[in-house]
Amino acid sequence: DTIAEGDSVSVSGVCLTVTRKGAGTFTADVSKETLSKTTLGGMRSGSKVNLERALTLSGRLGGHIVYGHVDGTGKIREIRPLGEARVFHIQADPSIMKSMVYKGAVTVDGVSLTVSAVRRDGFELAIIPITLERTTLGAVRAGERVNLETDIVGKYVLKSLESGGGGVTLDFLKDHGYS
């Protein structure tokens, strides 16, 4: 498949717009904000990245809805084996953790994953061998930073609840016959 100027491409979870296309390469402009809030600012020529083209509405959705609008970065605190898989413990800012739920979706460096545990200071992921083999996650080490994007549906639910959310509270539900 090909890409064209103007197409969106996820580069390790960061949505970038193709500004120039070459044979097997593309160029994208990156803002100072993106460089400062993602891991892209620390990358060098030759750095390995995860690449994914934008979802087409005629295609299948094999993960969760991802925009490439990174919420921030997290730090890999620990990687431990679990059979053939690996468990990653990722430390994240409280603003990101507010949207994190057990069995919820999170994107790590552009890879859609399921949260296997939520901890006080972060969350855990059990990553299967095929994901480790086909993405950059197989080469990351404890102490490295990764780009994080939480589930958009969860963000909207959280925003609704924090802003009053239409008045649905536990008391409201009890008053209307729910116990």
Image (spheres, rainbow, N blue to C red):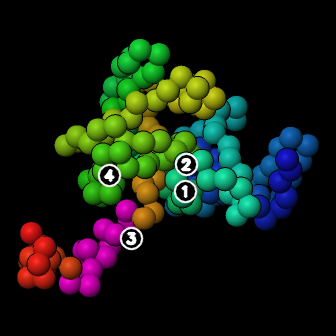
CB-based contact (under 8 Å), mark 1 and mark 3: no
Q: Is residue 35 magenta?
A: no
Characterize the local packing of mark 3: few (<14), some (14-19) or many (20 or more) Cα atoms within 10 angstroms.
few
Q: Please name the residue that numbered disc 3 is placed on.
A: 156
Is mark 2 in CB contact (under 8 Å) with mark 1?
Answer: yes
Q: Say left or right for 46 vs 161.
A: right
133 with respect to 2 (left or right): left
The numbered mark at residue 63 is 2
The mark nearer the N terminus, 3 or 4, is 4
Label ID, residue 100: 4
What stretch of residues is rendered in magenta? 154-167
Q: Front-most of 164 and 174?
A: 174
Residue 85 marker = none
Instruction: Please name the amino acid that badge 4 sits on.
Output: Met
Q: Residue furthest right?
A: 23
Residue positioned 78% across, 52% down in the render: 27
Disc 2 packing (10 Å; few <14; some 14–19; many ≥20):
few
Residue occupying the far bottom of the picture: 166
